Image (spheres, helix red, strand yellow):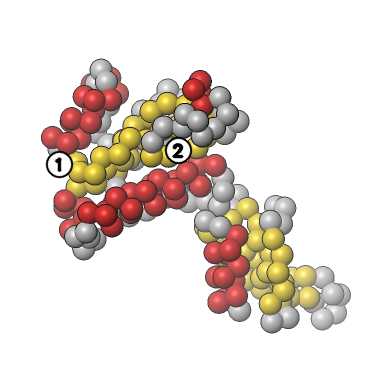
Amino acid sequence: MSYVLDKVEHNGLVIEVVPDESPMDPREWDNVGTMVCFHKRYELGDKTSYRSEDYESWEELYTAIEENGGIHIKPLYLYDHSGISIRIGAWHGLAQHAEWDSGQVGFIYTTKDALASYGVTDELTAVIGLGHEVEEYDRYLRGDVCGYLIKKACDSCGHLEVQDSSWGFSSIEEAIKAAKESI
């Protein structure tokens, strides 16, 4: 049983927000971006045909992605210190021991075809979308995904019984809003 992150009463029911103990990997979703990541201990990003042994530097990999139609190519950095976290751009100055516990792990990029299939024509929208994908993946890697339980007091015993639940929310606020809409 998970611990409760937040608890709210709404229309005579109790909403409990709890950690999602088995969230879906957002890289399995239909994404506009592709993450190419190489790490000795973790399997990260998307399954691609790119192999680390084929490149001697991040610049070579960047060039290969670009030659294969990649656009809006952004560097991905991993911070590995009592858990892992990923972001676009370096961690230096942002986290304790970042100079030792972080480094580049790959790239995220998209293609003109991927953007067209989503109807994205604006360059800024494309870049923001890639950033959102990285943020969503970071929440997944950190285990920062939650769900809600809607509970009602049993008439005969007074114990709370689960009436509804849903999972895969990125924030407590998002889960509470969805629970209230469900009620």
Q: Which of 105 and 124 is in front in this view?
A: 124
Q: Is residue 8 left or right of residue 116?
A: right
Give residue 77's position: percent from left, percent from top: 41, 33
Q: Can residue 117 be seen in this view?
A: no
Q: In this view, does 101 lie to the left or right of 120?
A: right
Q: Which of 145 and 121 is in front in this view?
A: 121
Residue shown at the point (15%, 41%) measured from the top left: 69
Residue shown at the point (42%, 26%) measured from the top left: 103
Give residue 47's position: percent from left, percent from top: 32, 38
- Give the mark nearest the N terminus, 1 or 2: 1
Q: Mark 2 points at which residue?
A: 86
Crowding at dot 2, Cα within 10 Å, few <14 / some 14-19 / many 20+, comes out as many
Quadrant of res 177: bottom right
- Which residue appears farthest toward the front when viewing the image? 93
Residue 97 vertical position relative to residue 67 in the rendered view, above or below: above
Q: Name the residue under label 1.
A: 69
Residue 57 vertical position relative to residue 62 in the rendered view, above or below: above
Give residue 169's position: percent from left, percent from top: 53, 59
Amino acid type assigned to the residue bearing label 1 in the image: Gly
Residue 176 vertical position relative to residue 96 in the rendered view, above or below: below
Amino acid type assigned to the residue bearing label 2 in the image: Ile
- Which residue appears farthest toward the top when viewing the image? 56
Picture mark count: 2
Crowding at dot 1, Cα within 10 Å, few <14 / some 14-19 / many 20+, comes out as few
Distance between the alpha carbons at the discs numbered 1 and 2: 24 Å
> Which structural element holds mark 1?
loop
Quadrant of res 11: bottom right
Q: Which mark is residue 142?
A: none
> Which structural element holds mark 2?
strand
Which corner quadrant holds the C terminus? bottom right
- Which residue appears farthest toward the right when viewing the image? 157
